[in-house]
Image (cartoon, rainbow, N blue to C red):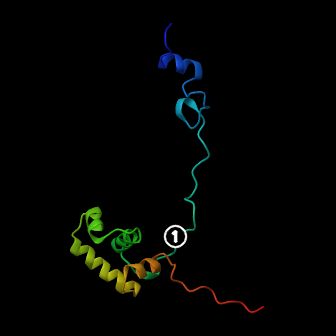
Amino acid sequence: MREKGVRDAVSETGPNGGRPRTGTHHGGHPGPPAGPPAGPPAPDRSAFGLTPRESTVMDLIARGRTNAEIARDLVISEFTVKNHVNRIFAKLAVATRGAAIARWLRTDDPPPPPTDP
C-alpha cells in the first residue's frame, strides 16, 4: 500500500488545505480599501519651529533611538546628531529626552480645568 504524498493531500483538501481563499491571490476579490492608520491624528508640531531634519531626529528620539542609532540611520555623524538634539531641546524649551518626547507627543499638556456644575 502506498503512503499519501503531498500531491495527494493537496488534491483532497484543495490548495489552501481546506481553508477558503482570501485576498487577491489566485483571483480572489480584494478586501476593502485601506483607510488611515488607527489611533488619534498626529499633533500639529509646526509651532515648535523645528526644521524638517530636526523633526526627523525628534521622531527617532521619540521611538527610543540613541544618538548613535540616529547617526547610523540618517548617515550623519554622531556629533551632528548631538547638535540637532541641542537645537531641538532649545526650541522645545526642555532639558531632557523624556521631556522632549512628552512635549513632542503633546503628553505634557496640562489637563483642561474642571468645569463648575
> Furthest residue to the right?
117
Disc 1 marks a residue whose amino acid type is Ala
Q: Is mark 1 on a helix, strand or loop?
A: loop
Percent coordinates x, y for residue 104 in the rendering: 45, 77
Q: Name the residue under label 1.
A: 42
Percent coordinates x, y for residue 20 in the rendering: 62, 31
Image-based side of 112 in relation to 2, left or right: right
Instruction: Please state which of residues 26 and 102 is positioned toward the viewer in this rendering.
Output: 102
Residue at screen point 37% across, 68% down: 60
- In the rendered view, would you say 51 is above or below 13? below
> Furthest residue to the bottom?
116
User: Are there few (<14), some (14-19), or many (20+) residues within 10 Å of tag 1?
Assistant: few
Residue at screen point 21% across, 69% down: 77
Percent coordinates x, y for residue 57 in the rendering: 34, 71
> Quarter-wise, where is residue 21 in the image?
top right
Image-based side of 98 in relation to 106, left or right: left
- In the rendered view, would you say 10 is above or below 59? above
Q: Quadrant of the C terminus?
A: bottom right
Image-based side of 42 in relation to 101, left or right: right
Residue at screen point 50% across, 75% down: 44
> Quarter-wise, where is residue 14 in the image?
top right
Count of numbered tags? 1
Image-based side of 52 in relation to 25, left or right: left
Instruction: Please state which of residues 44 and 5 is positioned toward the viewer in this rendering.
Output: 5
Percent coordinates x, y for residue 38 in the rendering: 57, 60
> Furthest residue to the front?
1
Instruction: Please state which of residues 70 and 19 is positioned toward the viewer in this rendering.
Output: 19
